[in-house]
């Protein structure tokens, strides 16, 4: 009672990653390829995203984001590459006062 099913579709969003110093606080991560596997009607496949917990801006759309693992129960049955779904620009640097530029303090 096994059949080959598409468990992950290329372009499918698999999760998000926090972005530090970006104009957005997170970016979606998507699958780079399809993943098909033979499963029974009783098996419940799932994916585990294994990117970093956070990334620093800037982030480019299509940039490598690591891998996702396809699992059934406690067993990894596949590994697929993932990429960032969007571009996240870096926040512009904060303007410093003359005092901060000269002395490195906050003027107090």
Image: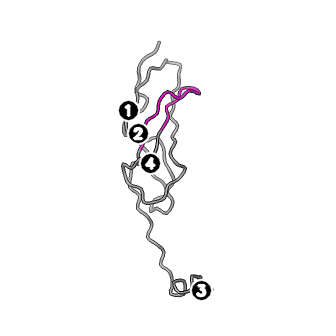
* Callout 3: SS: loop
* Callout 2: SS: strand
The spot of residue 20 in percent (x, y) is 51, 60
> Which residues are drawn in magenta?
68-82
Q: CA distance from mark 1 to mark 2?
A: 7 Å
Image marks 1 and 4: residues in contact by CB distance under 8 Å = no
* Callout 4: SS: strand
Check disc 4: other Cα within 10 Å, few if <14, some if 14-19, many if 20+.
some
Q: Is residue 8 above or below residue 14?
A: above
The spot of residue 36 in percent (x, y) is 40, 26
Q: Nearer the viewer, mark 1 or mark 4?
A: 1
Q: Badge 4 is on which residue?
A: 28
Mark 1 vs 3, N-terminal side: 1
Q: Main secondary structure of the magenta part?
A: strand
Q: Badge 3 is on which residue?
A: 107
Check disc 3: other Cα within 10 Å, few if <14, some if 14-19, many if 20+.
few
Q: Closer to the camera, 80 or 2?
A: 80
Image marks 4 and 3: residues in contact by CB distance under 8 Å = no
Q: Badge 2 is on which residue?
A: 31
Q: CA distance from mark 1 to mark 3?
A: 56 Å
Left or right of 80 on screen, residue 46: right
The spot of residue 10 in percent (x, y) is 36, 36
Residue 79 lies within the magenta run: yes
Q: Badge 1 is on which residue?
A: 34
Residue, x 43% and y 70% (percent of image)? Answer: 92
Check disc 1: other Cα within 10 Å, few if <14, some if 14-19, many if 20+.
some
């Amino acid at each position: 009672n096994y059949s080959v099913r598409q468990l992950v579709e290329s372009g499918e969003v698999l999760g998000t990653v926090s972005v530090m110093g970006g104009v957005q606080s997170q970016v979606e991560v998507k699958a780079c390829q399809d993943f098909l596997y033979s499963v029974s009607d009783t098996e419940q496949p799932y994916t585990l995203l294994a990117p970093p917990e956070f990334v620093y801006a800037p982030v480019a759309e299509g940039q490598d984001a690591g891998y996702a693992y396809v699992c059934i129960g406690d067993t990894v049955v596949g590994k697929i590459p993932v990429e960032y779904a969007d571009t996240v620009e870096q926040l512009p640097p904060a303007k410093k006062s003359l005092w901060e530029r000269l002395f490195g303090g906050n003027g107090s």
